[in-house]
Image (cartoon, rainbow, N blue to C red):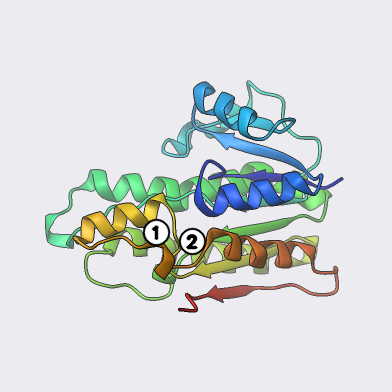
Amino acid sequence: MATHVITGAGSGIGAAVARRLHERGDDIVLMARDAGRAKQLAGAFPGARTLVGDLANPDRLSWAFSHQPMPERVDSLLHIAGVVDLGRVGDLGTKTWHSQLNVNLIAPAELTRLFLPQLRHDKGHVVFVNSGAGLTAHAEWGPYAASKHGLKALADALRQEEHGNGVRVTSVYPGRTASAMQEKVHHQEGKEYDPSRWIDPESVATTILMSLDLPRDAEVNDLTVRPGR
């Protein structure tokens, strides 16, 4: 049975991926920011294990893990959690930059470092759910796009470094996806939110599972998903 460590399983793409893996009988380990959130996730996915660690405070992840039982096997590490706050560069203070860089870039780097020995041993797969903003930056998306451009660089470097160890690395770049995050973005943009216009999280989950399920003789490096409407 494969074991998958997943961030962002509480909603959107992360919840869709966790549900699909859970339903097919895989073992899932869900990251939670605190004990209360861990209890919620355990209730939503009976039999799933949880790991408590706040992605907003990546400096504390190693300490947090040292006080919890870790999975004995890691077939994939799925970085799906993310945060966004829009604003013009001239108006944003360091708090906004730190919050998005911590969750979207530094925490994935630190989680990868902490799980890398197990991923090497198990010839595992690291999936970074990036964004179209990781390829092109637009006005008022500076901190988020910077974090996602950095995530692309992290994935590209990791792929070259770990190829010889049998670790596969995939970046997925979804366009706008119907989710609570997208609703927040529309609110910040002053636009009406219509989820039917955007990608269903289940569709992105399908692409992620496709990359996970490829035979060992193939690897998806980069996968762009765009709204079909």
**Residue at (53, 41) in percent of width and height:** 10
Residues under numbered marks 2 and 1 in contact, where contact means CB atoms less than 8 Å apart: yes
**CA–CA distance between discs 2 and 1?**
6 Å
Please identify the quadrant where the C terminus is shown: bottom left
**Residue at (22, 64) in percent of width and height:** 140
Q: Which mark is residue 151?
A: 2
**Disc 1 target residue:** 147
**Residue at (20, 58) in percent of width and height:** 87
**141 left or right, relative to 177:** left
Residue 9, image x, y percentages:
57, 43
Of residues 179 and 223, which is closer to you in this image? Answer: 179
Residue 31, image x, y percentages:
58, 37
- Whether residue 24 is situated above or below residue 62 in the rendered picture: below
Q: Which mark is residue 135?
A: none
Q: How many marks?
A: 2
Residue 133, image x, y percentages:
39, 69
Mark 1: which amino acid? Ser
Please identify the quadrant where the N terminus is shown: top right
- Whether residue 196 is situated above or below residue 16 in the rendered picture: below
The residue carrying pointer 1 sits among few (fewer than 14), some (14 to 19) or many (20 or more) residues within 10 Å by Cα, namely many
The residue carrying pointer 2 sits among few (fewer than 14), some (14 to 19) or many (20 or more) residues within 10 Å by Cα, namely many
> What element does badge 2 sit on?
helix
